[in-house]
Amino acid sequence: MAGILLKLGGFGFLRFSIGLFPEASAFFTPFIYAISVFGVMYASLTTLQQIDLKKIVAYSSVGHMGLVTIGLFSGNAQGILGAILLMISHGIVSGALFLCIGILYERHHTRIVRYYSGLIHTMPLFAVCFIIFSLGNLGLPGTSSFIGEFLIIAGSFETNS
């Protein structure tokens, strides 16, 4: 789902809504911005409350797709390029995180965060990979997620601060 279906919505906006109906997209851009900002904030706050690793990655995916929508409707090259880059990056990073969570579930038979203390001692290489993908999901500077999010924010502020 995170690798394909969420990107299908972004592609639909880019290909059909913006491509076929540019005047209607420009008219509804403030409304889309408001919904997207609310969605990003709500999904982020919901993510902070979760204790299941799979739900954490799923809700953060919803927040990332809100940023993609903001970038697509910014109407400039920076925002659209950032949205496409974030969709590609998110597909790779979230897929890798779901794979890591699946490996942890097979080994520990739970996805609750509090049961994974001391993971660095039992699975050190796996823990390093998991941290790298988690930081990529957070948008650490230097990762492709950061570049996409930065371009989205720069493009949207260029259009409407």
Image (tube, rainbow, N blue to C red):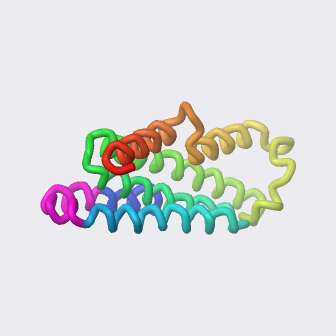
Q: Residue furthest top?
A: 142
Question: Residue 127 is drawn in which quadrant?
Answer: top right
| Residue found 40% across the figure and 65% down from its top | 34
| Residue found 43% across the figure and 54% down from its top | 67
Give 124 or 11, whichever is nearer the viewer.
11
Where the N terminus falls, by quadrant?
bottom left
- Residue 117: where, in percent of width, then height? 85, 53
| Residue found 73% across the figure and 36% down from its top | 125
Task: Confirm whether residue 127 shows in the render.
Answer: yes
Magenta segment, principal secondary structure?
helix
Q: Residue furthest front?
A: 161
What's drawn in magenta, residue-wise?
Answer: 11-27
Number of marks drawn: 0
Task: Confirm whether residue 88 shows in the render.
Answer: no
Position of 86 compared to 28: left or right? right
Position of 114 compared to 103: left or right? right
- Residue 109: where, in percent of width, then height? 75, 65
Against 126, is 24 above or below? below
- Residue 5: where, in percent of width, then height? 38, 62
Give 55 or 36, whichever is nearer the viewer.
36
Question: Residue 73 is drawn in which quadrant?
Answer: bottom left
Query: Is residue 22 on the magenta stretch?
Result: yes
Query: Is residue 122 on the magenta stretch?
Result: no
- Residue 114: where, in percent of width, then height? 82, 61
Question: Residue 152 is drawn in which quadrant?
Answer: top left
| Residue found 39% across the figure and 53% down from its top | 68
Position of 144 compared to 82: left or right? right
